[in-house]
Image (cartoon, rainbow, N blue to C red):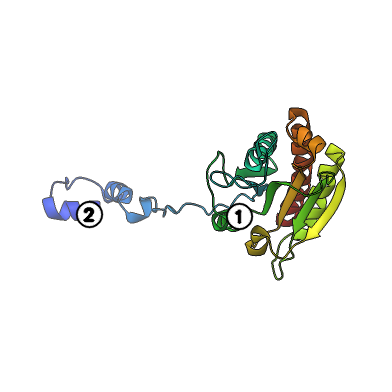
């Protein structure tokens, strides 16, 4: 309310006040003397999402729970246990590389996980998928490492299942010195046939070969297997990361 209005309403200003003094006082109350209000922006600034700089890899210890996998009678060995031993060691190694990979497994104990559930986990969470198995053969001389794959048409990924299989096979053989049985295209294996992410199933050795069985039961050799798998996984993880930049 201006000073002139105050005078008019209450008549309390002395008539002896000079016109100049009144004008000087009134100037204090003019709207022009009031600092203009500024509108505060209360909206939170939009933040640019931090780019993902790692790859999600899923490790599958084959079989488990009620499914023993391949078995040999002497000594009594279940494939599921060996698969878990190798996968667990690989998991431990990859946990040290969190800057490049985030690793999960389809099972962490001797539980039964169906093949459809393993595929579901892979398709929903992984950039690529590695399934670990041991092999058998009627001929006890059969030995070595082989990796299976299937080509998925129309999948937009940084690499194919075949390329994944090639790298995993190479790094595992290099680390262990095992016989290289190469990569194998397979249309029948369920995991390969139903995943929509690059997938490789590696057979790390033959339970039916006495010498190879002893290697698979040896901690040092298991560590070599895990290290070879780790190198291959990190190589492919770098390709996933590069594709996101």
Determine which quarter of the picture holds residue 195: bottom right
Residue at 78 percent across and 45 percent down: it is: 232
Q: Is residue 52 above or below residue 161?
A: above
Q: Position of residue 106 (x, y in %)?
A: 58, 47
Q: Position of residue 97 (x, y in %)?
A: 70, 37
Distance (Cα) linking label 2 and label 1: 80 Å
> Dot 1 surroundings within 10 Å: few (below 14), some, or many (20 or more)?
many
Q: Quadrant of the C terminus?
A: bottom right
Q: Position of residue 186 (x, y in %)?
A: 74, 62
> Dot 2 surroundings within 10 Å: few (below 14), some, or many (20 or more)?
some
Q: Nearer the viewer, residue 170 or 22?
A: 170
Left or right? Give the position of 13 relative to 151.
left
**Residue behind mark 1:** 122
Q: Nearer the viewer, residue 91 or 68?
A: 68
Determine which quarter of the picture holds residue 82: top right
Q: Is residue 82 above or below residue 23?
A: above
Disc 2, SS: helix
**Residue behind mark 2:** 4
How many numbered circles does the render carry?
Answer: 2
Residue extending farthest to the left is 10
Residue 159 in sight: no
């Amino acid at each position: 309310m201006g000073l002139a209005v105050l005078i008019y309403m209450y008549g309390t200003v002395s008539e002896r006040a000079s016109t100049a003094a009144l004008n000087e006082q009134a100037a204090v109350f003019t709207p022009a003397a009031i600092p203009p209000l500024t509108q505060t922006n209360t909206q939170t600034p939009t933040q640019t999402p931090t780019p993902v700089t790692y790859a999600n890899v899923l490790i599958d210890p084959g079989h488990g729970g009620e499914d023993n996998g391949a078995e040999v009678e002497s000594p009594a060995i279940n494939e599921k246990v060996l698969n878990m031993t190798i996968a667990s060691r690989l998991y431990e190694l990859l946990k040290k590389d969190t800057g490049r990979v985030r690793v999960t497994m389809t099972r962490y104990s001797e539980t039964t996980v169906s093949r459809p559930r393993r595929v579901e986990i892979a398709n929903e969470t992984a950039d690529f998928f590695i399934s670990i198995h041991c092999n058998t053969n009627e001929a006890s001389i059969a030995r070595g490492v082989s990796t299976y794959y299937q080509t998925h048409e129309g999948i937009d990924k940084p690499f194919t299942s075949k390329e994944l299989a090639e790298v995993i096979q190479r790094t595992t053989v290099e680390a262990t010195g095992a016989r290289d049985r190469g990569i194998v295209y397979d249309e029948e294996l369920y995991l390969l046939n139903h995943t929509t992410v690059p997938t490789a199933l590696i057979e790390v050795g033959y339970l039916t070969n006495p010498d190879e069985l002893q290697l698979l039961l040896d901690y040092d050799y298991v560590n070599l297997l895990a290290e070879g798998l780790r190198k291959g996984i990190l190589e492919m993880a770098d390709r996933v990361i590069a594709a996101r930049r």
